[in-house]
Image: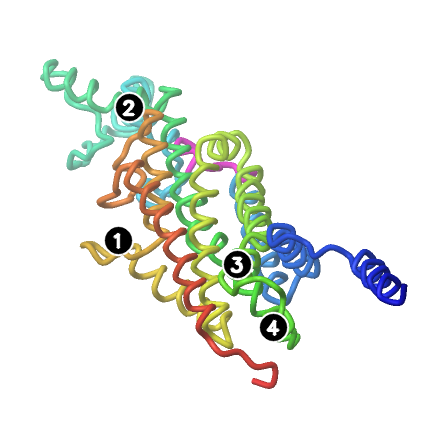
């Protein structure tokens, strides 16, 4: 009986022990833990939000201005402060002949005028000069040529294409890919493990019953939704500030924003696991390497992630019928190549970071 009592007590004790959670459940618990750690926006996140607000204000100011992103109402010093539309109207034959009539009235005195006739001054021809009526062929050809600017500006397709490529060049290709996208991914992806190190809870995280590579991937998956939220959300804010052109740009280019965000998140997550000051390293990378290398000619720009994001935007715009030369993305790769490189870079950087994280030594007092 004593043996039976002991066995029954052991069985009761074992039944009272809660079952150990499966590794898969533990993995998703770590993902949720990493996600919750980003509820509180850090200093770098506020800096990124501030820069985004300034950029949105700039886009809205240009959109609401008199000229906006369009060509025809934009003023130029070459035209004496006139807009392209006003200068084109001056070149039209009707306006030129009207100017000639005024010149003739000033040069030829009236029959009832008491002042003696004055000799007309000798004037050299210029682009706005009315051709002599003694040469009707030259007059007709010049009138035809000078009527082209007004006819071009009257084309709705031309003006819309010019405005859209101007907006795309300045906002998606310039402001967004240039610094809004890298800054937001840096703020959240580098903090996935950087926050644990700053709060001295990284060693506690490493004691969880999960292999280190799984911990690394879990923290990445926990930070990725925040990167996508602020990266793609920032792109949406910039596009909404651009009016109809911006809404069209967001509809066409949001997949490129998603692909670029994932690749940058994998890169900066690796930076956060490798360096004790990941923000400093990331800022140097964004404003020196990405800002310079992505715009250089030759093959060196192939090392830049932003180059492939720009190539995706470029190909989407060209496929929609917009002029390629106006987008100013030299030597852009095809859309298939850009997607393949971004996907491969994301997986390769994630694998490299998991391998590096599994072999590094971490201490709470360092």
Cα–Cα span, label 3 and label 4: 14 Å
Q: CA distance from mark 2 to mark 1?
A: 52 Å
User: Residues under labels 2 and 3: Cα distance?
Assistant: 76 Å
Percent position of residue 224, x then y: 55, 51
Q: Earlier in the sequence, mark 2 or mark 1?
A: 2
Q: Which of the 4 image quadrants contains residue 20?
A: bottom right
Q: CA distance from mark 2 to mark 4?
A: 78 Å
Q: Is residue 64 left or right of residue 327?
A: right
Nearest to the eye among marks 2 and 3: give it: 3
Sequence-wise first label, 2 or 3: 2
Q: Earlier in the sequence, mark 2 or mark 4?
A: 2
Q: Position of residue 351 (x, y in %)?
A: 40, 58
Query: Split into 4 quadrants, where in the image is the N terminus?
Result: bottom right
Helix or strand or loop: what does disc 2 sit on?
helix
Q: Earlier in the sequence, mark 3 or mark 1?
A: 3
Dot placed on the residue nearer the N-terminal end, 4 or 1: 4
- Label 3 SS: helix
Say the numbered circle drawn on residue 70: none
Residue 299, percent from left and from top: 19, 54
What SS does tag 4 mark? helix
Cα–Cα gap, marks 3 and 1? 30 Å
- Mark 1 and mark 3 in contact (Cβ < 8 Å)? no
Q: Find disc 4 in the rendering and name its residue.
A: 202
Disc 2 versus disc 1: nearer the observer: 1
Camera-side residue of 133 and 94? 94
- Do residues under tags 2 and 3 come within 8 Å of each other at their CB atoms? no
Q: Residue at x 35, y 45 (%)?
A: 310
Marks 3 and 4, the one that precedes in the sequence: 4
Q: Which residue is mark 3?
A: 214
Q: Which residue is mark 2?
A: 96
């Amino acid at each position: 009986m004593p043996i039976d009592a002991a066995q029954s007590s052991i069985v009761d004790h074992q039944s009272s022990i809660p079952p150990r959670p499966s590794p898969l459940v533990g993995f998703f618990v770590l993902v949720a833990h990493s996600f919750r750690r980003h509820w509180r926006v850090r200093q770098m996140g506020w800096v990124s939000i501030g820069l985004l607000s300034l950029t949105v204000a700039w886009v809205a100011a240009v959109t609401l201005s008199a000229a906006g992103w369009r060509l025809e109402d934009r003023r130029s010093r070459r035209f004496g402060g006139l807009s392209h539309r006003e200068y084109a109207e001056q070149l039209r034959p009707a306006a030129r002949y009207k100017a000639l009539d005024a010149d003739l009235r000033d040069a030829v005195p009236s029959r009832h005028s008491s002042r003696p006739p004055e000799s007309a001054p000798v004037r050299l021809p210029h682009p706005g000069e009315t051709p002599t009526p003694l040469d009707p062929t030259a007059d007709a050809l010049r009138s035809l040529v000078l009527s082209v600017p007004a006819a071009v500006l009257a084309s709705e397709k031309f003006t819309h294409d010019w405005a859209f490529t101007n907006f795309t060049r300045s906002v998606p290709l310039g402001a967004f890919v240039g610094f809004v996208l890298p800054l937001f991914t840096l703020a959240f992806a580098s903090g996935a493990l950087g926050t644990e190190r700053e709060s001295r809870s990284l060693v506690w995280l490493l004691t969880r019953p999960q292999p280190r590579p799984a911990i690394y991937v879990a923290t990445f998956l926990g930070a990725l939704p925040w990167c996508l939220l602020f990266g793609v959300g920032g792109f949406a804010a910039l596009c909404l500030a651009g009016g109809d052109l911006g809404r069209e740009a967001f509809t066409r280019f949001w997949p490129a924003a998603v692909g670029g965000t994932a690749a940058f998140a994998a890169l900066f997550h690796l930076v956060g696991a490798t360096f004790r000051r990941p923000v400093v390293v990331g800022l140097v990378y964004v404003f020196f390497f990405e800002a310079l290398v992505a715009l250089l000619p030759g093959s060196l720009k192939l090392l830049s992630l932003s180059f492939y994001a720009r190539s995706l935007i470029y190909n989407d715009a060209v496929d929609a019928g917009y002029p390629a030369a106006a987008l100013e993305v030299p030597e852009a790769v095809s859309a298939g190549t850009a997607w393949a490189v971004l996907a491969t870079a994301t997986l390769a950087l994630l694998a490299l970071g998991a391998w590096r994280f599994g072999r590094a030594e971490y201490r709470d007092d360092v």
